[in-house]
Amino acid sequence: MTIAEMIQRKKEMGYSNKQLAELSGVPLGTIQKIFSGSTETPRYQTVQALSKVLEKKKYSYERSEAVNEMFMETSSYASSSSATDTIGKTMEDYLALPEGTRIEMIDGVFYDMAAPTVVHQRIGAMIFNVFENHINKNGGKCIAAVAPTDVQLDCDDKTMVQPDVLVVCDRDKIIKARVVGAPDLIVEVLSPSNWFMDIIKKKDKYKNAGVREYWIVLPEHKKVLVYHFESSSDYTEYSFEDRIPVAIWNNKCEVDFKFIYSKVEFLYDR
């Protein structure tokens, strides 16, 4: 991809320099020089890293105005702290929320969670069933759970998430109210309103917290991106035609996405 092509793709996809740096791993300063024209011949590795990101539009949902706001440097959910009162929160604030409120807290910021679709719920439930059946059949101490299960990810009072599906194999991390610490495996099922959070923001949080394996399910595109953080920062892409092995169980458990899709396909046109 030429620099001219990258400039055009960047414009089409609506990325800022900062977002492109986060996605590609290329330093922000380098990106600024490339797209301002001050660097005309960037290194091959830099071009490859940027091209890899800019060629992935097929994994992005058509972005509404609300989703576009997620790309602003200030969170779309907390664009005005005085108006939304979502910044600078702690565990005390989170626990004081009315019962049933769908909120996640990341680094002291509250993020609203949209109600999941039936497709979203069914896919998550069927993945959970595969995990639960494997655990029941093979024994061991792992525990599988589904949302809404609170996960105090960083063991501090600033972050509480509710992954769609999770597996914890260290029972010392589990108390009656929540999981305290990083699960071994997390699955997030994307919807148009949460793709930025799951692909970028929460992915980084999960990796840094010590999550070993992270699956991102993209129902609209019938794709699954699987990260094995212990060995690589890159993902492996699967389709809804594949059986996906679970690395934390040495690939002895597989999720048959062809079967899962057969159970939700009728909902796609409704």
Image: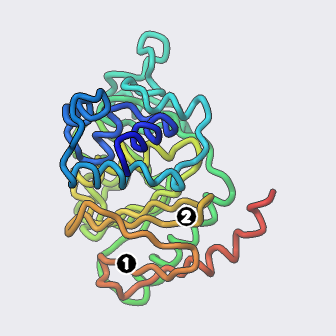
Would you say residue 253 is visible in this rendering? yes
Amino acid identity at mark 1? Val
* Left-right relation of 83 to 193: left
Identify which residue, 193 or 7, lies in the foreground. 7
| Residue type at tag 2 | Gly
Q: Dots 2 and 1: beta carbons under 8 Å?
A: no
Tell me if residue 151 can be seen: no
Q: Which color scheme is applied?
A: rainbow
At which x and y percent is residue 128? 50, 70
Q: Which numbered marker is on residue 124?
A: 2
Q: Position of residue 196 (x, y in %)?
A: 46, 43
Q: Is residue 21 above or below residue 80?
A: below
Between disc 2 and disc 1, the foreground one is 1
Residue at x 23% of width, y 49% of height = 46
Q: Which mark is residue 246?
A: 1
- Quadrant in the rendering for residue 211: bottom left
